[in-house]
Amino acid sequence: MFFDVSIAKEIWAAKYRFGGKDGLPGDADFDATAARVAAAAAGNESDIERPIWQARFEDAIAKMQFIPAGRILAGAGTDRAVTLFNCFVMGTIPDSLEGIFDHLKQAALTMQQGGGVGMDFSTIRPRGAEVKGVGSDASGPLSFMDCWDSMCRTVHSAGARRGAMMGCLRIDHPDIEDFIDAKRDGARFRNFNLSVLVSDAFMAALEQDGEWPLAFDGTIYRTVQARALWDRLMQATYDVAEPGVIFIDRVNQKNNLAYCETISASNPCGEQMLPPYGACLLGSINLAALVDNPFEEGAAIDEASLADLTATAIRFLDNIIDISRYPLAEQEAEAKAKRRIGLGITGLADALLFCGRAYGSEAAIQLTERWLTVIRDAAYRASARLAEEKGAFPLYDAAMLDQPNLLALDAETRALISSHGLRNGCLTSIAPTGTTSLLAGNVSSGVEPVFAYSYQRRILNPDGSARHETVEDYALRAWRQVKGDAVPPDDLFVSAQSLDPAAHVRMQAAAQALIDSSISKTVNVPEDISFDDFSDVYLDGYRRGCKGLTTYRPNSVTGSVLSVAPVEEPAQSQPVLEQRDEALEGTTYKLKWPDSAHAVYVTINNIDADGAVRPFEIFINSKNMEHYAWTLGLTRMISAVFRRGGDVSFVADELKAVFDPRGGSWMNGKYVPSLLAAIGGIIEKHLHQFAPGQLELPVIPRAAPASQAAAPGGPICPQCSATGMIREEGCNKCLECGYSKCG
């Protein structure tokens, strides 16, 4: 059922199909992809066991019952110089200039091979602190985060996969207030997700309405009211959707490996809290593909089959640890010492629908807990049997049996672990499954509710005209196969927008209690939610045992995410462009680029359209004729985008990401990777003059009935330039082309 959806075929062809290289055959179809990946993973087995496990791996992947993470699907068995691990947390950053830039280099090398990175910047002294020996003041962690942000843009522009980073700062760091407010500047830290590391001590101070010291290296810089700091954090998240919150003490208290590591950061999407140089290796069990008799009496998942599939997935991921490349030796040593993996789920909401449970209901919570209990117990039993066969992970200690996750296991499983140890230090997490859920036929993503049951996807025809194709959720298509024309009941087919925020949190907390690491999930809240109710979402999550929380409320900085309405095909194939007035007002900016003997002048003219002023055209002039051809082409293309209206901020973003292999330049204290990037900065500066709301930003509805088709109408996708980006699992996702970025 999954490959009868055109978007699944396109995702496979664009992201996961191997085209062949150096005598290795290309993938003719998805079955060939499954065979390639299975053969690579089974290559770590003995000669006798290899064909047995290769067949099991291939069967599970080909049926989309087990979906390895995208890095594995794209890279395993290709001989490409890439890592099969999705994300890493980098080493502890030293509080010295040399050490900071050594770690910046390590992050760049990791991202070059396709790995996302997370960092804790709490170890860098605050802004204004004395730098002994040089007679100057420190610039603080945020200034160095700017360097990481520029590096990420540069590495991506040089041809690597689009980068993703997580930046963390402790809530007691003296620069925490600046960190909290950083994303209010829409141009800063565009390649970062941000999270505040919130301690139990702070939550206690908040409960007692007490004071909270901001300190570094034993020195208290000042004291603030805990309530005021919390409200500042909540207000920033309410206004611009960041920072997120990580309850860091809970993370460490419930870590299987607490006896040999301390965690202070997470990977970019928050599902893997990791120690220095820790790596996350991901895969998901597709629950939607396992339900027998969907929408019929007795619809269920066979729990014995689910346990067997879990054991197969654990063995597969354990093998990947040994066949993967690692960007850094430190990452390889950490991965092989603890053999941490992250088996999760996808298609949960669809599977619940098949069984007649509405996401967020008490019945859905109970069934979710039942399925995850089967997966948890089967995962630990499989890892213990692997330890018996291949040996426990090198840092295994019987102290693990006293950790909370293992204390919850049944006596039989604990006895098996006691006898043989464990092959893997941590076993489960629930990661974003953005493009792999589309690959599986548009099943619901990860642990999330269905975002939109139906929406319109714009596709360009070979002649340049456009058509619209309806993309439907996997469960909605199954409903029609079983129920025909019967209308799906709204009380069953709930969506991310129609759910009460408390229902989101209840589902996340129920899953978290059965997961070793953490969960990547976005709690979508309505735009008109009150600030007090919004703040209560985080307090509710803390009280229910969540390890972290991310919310999304439509706002003027990140935009709205989806408008729901039927799409009408235009009567003409080309859009009507606004007519230019004879005289327009604008601004000319002078740009001096070091490689050019002559200044570059950038003129941007505005137009008043029904009382709203917005950019209409751009001209670039210089005495240096070397740039004439590309500047002329560039101005015509950008002007065409301006004239079509809508949110045009992506133009600046794309230009700012352009990397010049000959080198960039430092301008006004910031590194600019190319002349085009400098022009992008000018466009961004020009756009800042417009008040929020003057550039078109559509509004998200409170609820989206299952029977309605959704037309993308939100922020612009940087890959296909379509509107309709959504925020889910801590990631930006495009409903048109399948683009996904956690950052």
Image (cartoon, grey):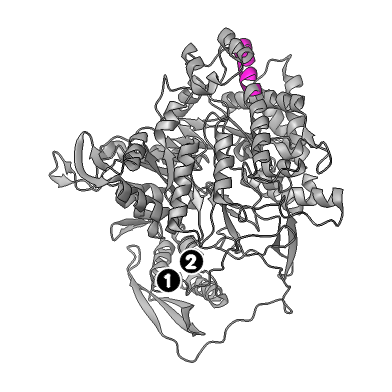
- Percent x, y of residue 136: 15, 46
Quadrant where the image shows the N terminus: top right
Relative to 45, 300 lies left or right: right
Residue 418, placed above or below residue 484: above
Nearer the observer, 85 or 161: 85
CB within 8 Å, label 2 to label 1: yes
Query: In which image quadrant can residue 576 be found?
Result: bottom right
Residue 287, placed above or below residue 450: above
- Percent x, y of residue 34: 73, 35
Of the numbered discs 2 and 1, the one sitting upstream in the chain is 2
Residue at the spot x=77%, y=30% of the render? Answer: 59
Residue 226, placed above or below residue 75: below
- Percent x, y of residue 304: 75, 24
Magenta segment range? 378-389
**Residue under circle 1?**
687
Q: Residues within 10 Å of mark 2 (few under 14, many from 20)?
A: some
Is residue 267 in sight in this rendering?
A: no
| Mark 2, secondary structure of its residue | helix
Residue at the spot x=49%, y=73% of the render? Answer: 695
**Residue under circle 2?**
649
Is residue 675 in sight in this rendering?
A: yes
Direction top: furthest residue: 419
Q: Which amino acid type is marked by label 1?
A: Leu
Q: CA distance from mark 2 to mark 1?
A: 7 Å
Magenta segment: does it hold 379?
yes
Nearer the observer, 168 or 355: 355
| Mark 1, secondary structure of its residue | helix
Residue at the spot x=71%, y=29% of the render? Answer: 38
